[in-house]
Image (cartoon, rainbow, N blue to C red):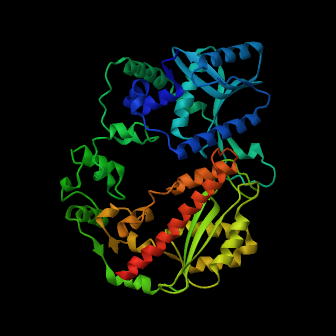
Amino acid sequence: MHTLSKSTFVRGCQCEKSLYLNKYHKEFQSSISENQEAIFEQGKDVGFLARKLFSNGIDASPPNYFSYDGSVKKTELAIKKGDTTIYEAAFLFDNVLAALDILAKDSDGWKGFEVKSSTEVKDTHILDAALQYYLIQNTGISLQDISIIHINNQYLRGGELEIEKLFIKKSILKEVLELQTFITKKIMELKSVLEEKVIPNIEIGLQCNDPYPCDFIDYCWKKIPPYSVFDIANLRTTKKFELFNQGIIQLKDIPKDFALNANQWQQVNCELEQKSVVDKPRIKEFTAELIYPLYFLDFETFQLAIPKFVNTRPYQQLVFQYSLHKQNSKGSDLLHYEFIAETNSYDPRISFIKKLVADCGEEGDILVYNIAFERTRLQELANDFPEFSDSISNILNRLKDLMIPFRERWFYTPEMKGSYSIKVVLPALLPKFSYSNLEIKDGSTASSIYSSMVQGVFTGDKKKTKRALLEYCKLDTLAMVKIIEKLNSL
């Protein structure tokens, strides 16, 4: 039985308290979100695909997380037999366990490869590779090199997927060797932490989210009130902890000479005085310039680490859904149009473009919330499908940003708590409207669910879930309609 694994070692390097809680107090651990699960699944898919770079390997993977002893023995046996490629090669030394994605032997000797679904080599990748190198060397295998295999986000799929072009191999042997003294020392320190009888007394800090959001944040942050200095919009995290380390948590305790900008002080003062800000002349000017028929548009996108469609790149944001409300004149009845792509092997973008162009007509302003997102997606579509560039340009030229009055603080209420997200603005303006009753409540969940459908791993009710996706997107554009109505009434 091992004391530390690669994942718990990295966890302990981030925070020793997290390591201890993970070992002895799993009951305090937060559940994994649907979006996080999707990220983990995508990482597994990338790992399996990278094996094709090293064909005919022996798979030493254990049947489950608790059976790595068998994986270690399987690795030892494969090496003794003379196998030259081992997937999930596992090594145990000094009660520390780690599995390497790919161990391969060529004319130079053994080389290690760790696969990451990111588009670059990160410090934490080097750290866990350094632990793997340490264990492998100490079990008698001399590694000639160790590398990170990561996604090449400049790869553009032409036809069949080209594995060699999709991945980049980068040797990190130099960096790993420099960390070997640290690894030896840190293993001893973390083992000592786990031998203690009490939870380490470590205060919350930058380590709670660096390099990963900790799954014990809910436990460690329970003394922080729902609205505190940590909720001041656009304030650097270091500045938030500067206040916290002075014992300042409540907004009312912030010193008057503390360096906040005008919007941040506005947020604090509006909360303390429970007052709102309404700049009626600027709001009136904004609404008066809108040209009818008026459209309210919202997109949803998904990303795939492994590009599925021709002329797409890894992690490219691909449109798959939109909602569009139309109002021919102020106060007139609403028309609603919507689209969601089929989750088959066909690229969803052409169907998306054709229906969007038809639904948006030729004239009238098109309101979006946070114009940079929709504008960028439309520009990408125009570049990728030049035959539609004129029609897409017509839509681009008519876009206007409904976020502006809230981002510029022409309208601000204490309920907004420094945010101008539509999911905060809507209930602040119109309390009876909320996303809380929806089955799908946010864009990241919508994206991960649709992505799982495209990849064929979704296990729920497809028809019901597609209806939920449509309802979510529809509320985004209905929210914009209601926001305009409220702004007009002011």
Q: Which residue is drawn at 46% across and 31% down?
A: 11
Answer whether residue 229 is visible to the viewer in this image. Answer: yes
Q: How many marks?
A: 0
Q: Nearer the viewer, residue 65 or 481?
A: 481
Above or below: residue 362 compared with residue 462:
below
Q: Which of 84 and 293 is in front in this view?
A: 293
Answer whether residue 303 is visible to the viewer in this image. Answer: no
283 left or right of 164? left
Give the quarter of the figure containing the C terminus: bottom left
Q: Residue at x 22, y 57 (%)?
A: 258
Above or below: residue 132 compared with residue 364:
above
57 left or right of 448? right
Q: Nearer the viewer, residue 304 or 187?
A: 304
Residue 56 image point, x, y percent: 80, 28
341 left or right of 254? right
Residue 38 image point, x, y percent: 59, 44
Q: Residue at x 58, y 25 (%)?
A: 65
Above or below: residue 341 compared with residue 453:
below
Q: Residue at x 76, y 32 (%)?
A: 54
Residue 319 image point, x, y percent: 64, 62
Above or below: residue 392 compared with residue 25:
below
Residue 298 image point, x, y percent: 56, 68
